[in-house]
Image (spheres, rainbow, N blue to C red):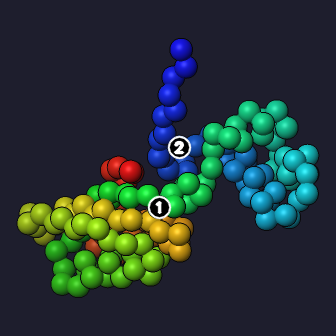
Amino acid sequence: MSESAKYYVVTKKAVPDVLLRVVEAKRLLESEKVLTIQEAVDAVGISRSSFYKYKDDIFQFHDNSQQSTFTLTFQMDDEPGLLSDVLKIIAAYRANILTIHQSIPINGVASLSLSIQVLQNTGDISNMLEEMERQKGVHHVKILARE
């Protein structure tokens, strides 16, 4: 009996180096910077067997996120205009905001959850999350769920 596929969202720092190199090799092939798998694996410093072992199991987050709904959670300082700034980041990446829930701030910090829909023209979601977390006053941006 085979186990059904399970998916995990992890940050880059938790991913073994060989898997990151497989992703890079696939990117080189897709961009046609190299023409063969051998050239790709040589360029990133892995074996062909490692490439073939993992190529169907690892992909960049954005590659498989089209037409998905994500629920994000984070905390933010209770400052006028900060939520608006976060929503502008999401709008700049052309994601569709479905729901917003904000708690009453306690000790000057509010907890938020946002549900966003990723569309075909939405930019790279991992870059969007990084930009949100770099926003002054925003803390601990995490993905709670993906549908």
Badge number at residue 67? 1
Q: Is residue 135 left or right of residue 38?
A: left
Q: Secondary structure at mark 2?
A: helix
Above or below residue 42? Residue 78 is below
Residue 15 as seen in the image, left or right of residue 20: left
Q: How many marks?
A: 2
Label 1: few (<14), some (14–19) or many (≥20) C-alpha neighbours in 10 Å: some
Q: Is residue 56 visible?
A: yes
Mark nearest the camera among 2 and 1 is 1
- Compared with residue 18, is residue 61 higher up or lower down, i.e. above or below? below
Instruction: Name the residue at the top extreme.
Output: 1
Q: Quadrant of residue 101?
A: bottom left
Q: SS for tag 1?
A: loop
Q: CA distance from mark 2 to mark 1?
A: 26 Å
Disc 2 marks a residue whose amino acid type is Ala
Q: Residues within 10 Å of mark 2 (few under 14, many from 20)?
A: few
Q: Position of residue 116 (x, y in %)?
A: 35, 65
Q: Position of residue 87 (x, y in %)?
A: 32, 78
Q: Is residue 1 above or below residue 141?
A: above
Numbered label attached to residue 14:
2
Q: Horizontal placement of 119 versus 104: left or right?
A: right
Identity of the residue drawn at 77% across and 60% down = 30
Please name the amino acid that badge 1 sits on.
Gln
Foreground pick, 119 / 71:
119
> As rendered, which of 99 and 54 lies closer to the eye?
99
In primary-sequence order, the first of circles 2 and 1 is 2
In-front residue for pair 92/147: 147
The tag on residue 29 is: none
The residue sitting at 22% across, 63% down in the picture is 112
Residue drawn at 88 percent across, 59 percent down: 34
Q: Is residue 140 visible?
A: no
